[in-house]
Amino acid sequence: MRRIVEVKSVGPYTVWLRFEDGVCGGLDLSELVGKGVFATWRALDVFNQVTIDPDTHTLRWPGGIDLAPEVLYEDLKKARV
């Protein structure tokens, strides 16, 4: 299981992540904005409240929104190529 150890919002709908193995970088999540549960992200201040769930190591937002670290890890690795 991949563990996210640091996250911060670094721009409109973009997060910077660091995983425990040192892999890090930014991901643009804007393609999710407004779709289904991600409708609350239309308010950028909600998106900017991203945290790491201490139990599941997922990214978490208010309203129960979360994203799995494994998917984010693979997306980040693809973005770095």
Image: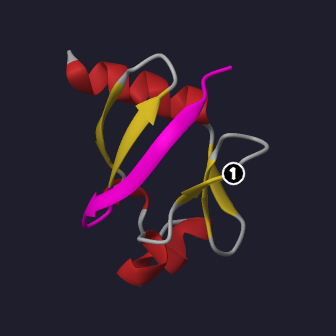
Residue 25 appears at what percent x and percent y? 28, 34
Q: Nearer the viewer, residue 44 or 16?
A: 16
Residue 39 appears at what percent x and percent y? 52, 76
Q: Residue at x 44, y 70 (%)?
A: 47
Q: Residue at x 53, y 79 (%)?
A: 40
Region in magenta: 1-14
With 36 as the anchor, is 75 left or right in this view? Answer: left
Q: Nearer the viewer, residue 44 or 57?
A: 57
Q: Residue at x 43, y 58 (%)?
A: 32
| Residue to which mark 1 is pinned | 53
With 49 as the anchor, is 78 left or right in this view? Answer: left
Name the image quarter holding residue 14: bottom left
Q: Nearer the viewer, residue 58 or 18?
A: 18
Asked if residue 64 is positioned above or below residue 44 in the image, the reply reads above
Prevailing secondary structure class for the magenta stretch in the rendered image: strand
Residue 78 appears at what percent x and percent y? 31, 20
Q: Is residue 10 magenta?
A: yes
Mark 1 neighbour class, 10 Å CA radius: few under 14, some 14 to 19, many 20 or more: few
Amino acid type shown at disc 1: Asp
